[in-house]
Image: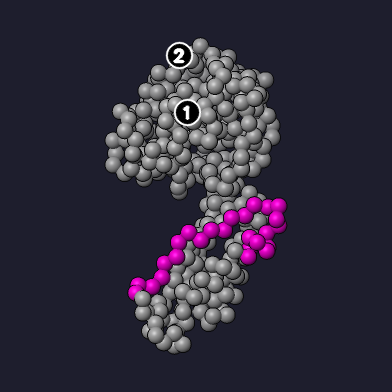
Amino acid sequence: MDKPDLSNEVKSLLPELIRLRRDFHRHPEPAFQEERTAAVVAAYLRDLGLPVQSGIAQTGVVGLIEGKKPGRTLLLRADMDALPVEEANEIDYRSEVPGRMHACGHDGHTAILLGVARVLAEKKDRLVGNVKLMFQPAEEKPGGALPMIQEGILENPKVDAALALHLAMMLPTGQIGVRPGPVFASTDEFRIVVLGKGGHGGMPHETVDPIVCAARVVEALQTLVSRECHPTKALVLTIGCITGGQTFNVVPDRVELGGTVRTYDAALRQSMEERIRRVVKGTTEAAGADYQLDYRYLYPPLLNDLAMVALVESIAHNVVGEQHTLVHDLDMIGEDMAFIMERVPGCYFFVGARNEEKGCIHPLHSSRFNFDEDAMPIAVEILIRCVERFLND
């Protein structure tokens, strides 16, 4: 890769970023249990002389960098939680907690934001406005962004815009991915119970078979995508689990189906619960069965603001070069940073961290996931320059 344009202060941070990242990696903590991580973060920020709030949404931490002059406030967010994955990497900083692993790069995100805090704390007298540092629990699930909003993360001082990033294994180190508009899809889930009448497998005429009915439901639901959704709009409806019956010769009384709905379109998202209910109701009635539907709205779609995208793109051009700043692909996964960006303009972008020579090739959530640590100072540099331009220009 071409050498990125890094300041000397950021170049010198690399050993510190690695130390922090590997410490977090050794001690992964799941959603809303990030107590050690939060304590390390809070102590680090206090050592920089920054005001700190802890215990927000259980384990969230917020630091504030106040510029010498009043102005706008930019929020920077890092997620802290780990995954229920048994690490397969043979590295000297592998997870010390059985069944837990930082398999999504959140250890890197947290280290990156602490590095940003260290550099900006020394520059705060040159800033016009404020930087709010948001260390969030539970990004993977059930989501810590909304509880932090409910506890006032966007107030005192009022947040004007937000930035977040993700280390990306589909991009080599030295590349940046960013796109305007939709980035991630809404992620909702549902549970359907098909209620039939059980009986002997050899006398199906005396039953109302919920397994046959459930199979019809699965097929019928796909017409919501293929025949009711406009062809230019993205929609995913996936049935991920079916549970019913215990043995070969008994028709059960009930079958349960679990699934997810994903889209970038807010109006389409809001229509899906009623559409699913209509299909399930009609299909079960036709079979003489009944149903229950439990529908849960989880994360909204994440939409990048055009002006904030232009800011990140411009900075990325300066740091890694225009030829290494790419339009990132759309993705149908979910991200609860969307709750922040429903309320303030923001940009969520991707920092390449793939390096085949170092064996950093495995995807997110893999037991062999590991990222190129040389990506961290690139992320720090971009965030620092975005802060300076957003606040001072």
Q: Which residue is mark 2?
A: 12
Q: Label 1 sits on what residue type?
A: Asn
Q: Secondary structure at mark 2?
A: loop
Q: 136 or 211, which lies in front?
A: 211
Seen from this angle, which residue lies furthest front?
Answer: 357
Is residue 293 rendered to the left or right of residue 243? Answer: right
Between circles 2 and 1, the one closer to the viewer is 1
The disc placed on residue 355 is 1
Q: Quadrant of residue 199?
A: bottom left
As drawn, 259 above or below 2:
below
Q: Is residue 111 visible?
A: no
- 263 falls in the magenta region: no
Q: Quadrant of the N terminus?
A: top right
Q: Earlier in the sequence, mark 2 or mark 1?
A: 2
Q: Say few, some or many: other residues with alpha carbon within 10 Å of mark 1 (under 14 / 14 to 19 / 20 or more).
A: many
Residue range in magenta is 223-247
Q: CA distance from mark 2 to mark 1?
A: 21 Å
Is residue 336 rendered to the left or right of residue 250? Answer: right
Q: Say few, some or many: other residues with alpha carbon within 10 Å of mark 2 (under 14 / 14 to 19 / 20 or more).
A: few
Q: 299 or 168, which lies in front?
A: 168
Q: Quadrant of residue 387?
A: top right
As drawn, 21 above or below 194:
above
Q: Quadrant of residue 25?
A: top left
Q: Residue at x 54, y 13 (%)?
A: 7
Q: Label 2 sits on what residue type?
A: Ser
Residue 166 horizontal/vertical position (percent): 52, 34
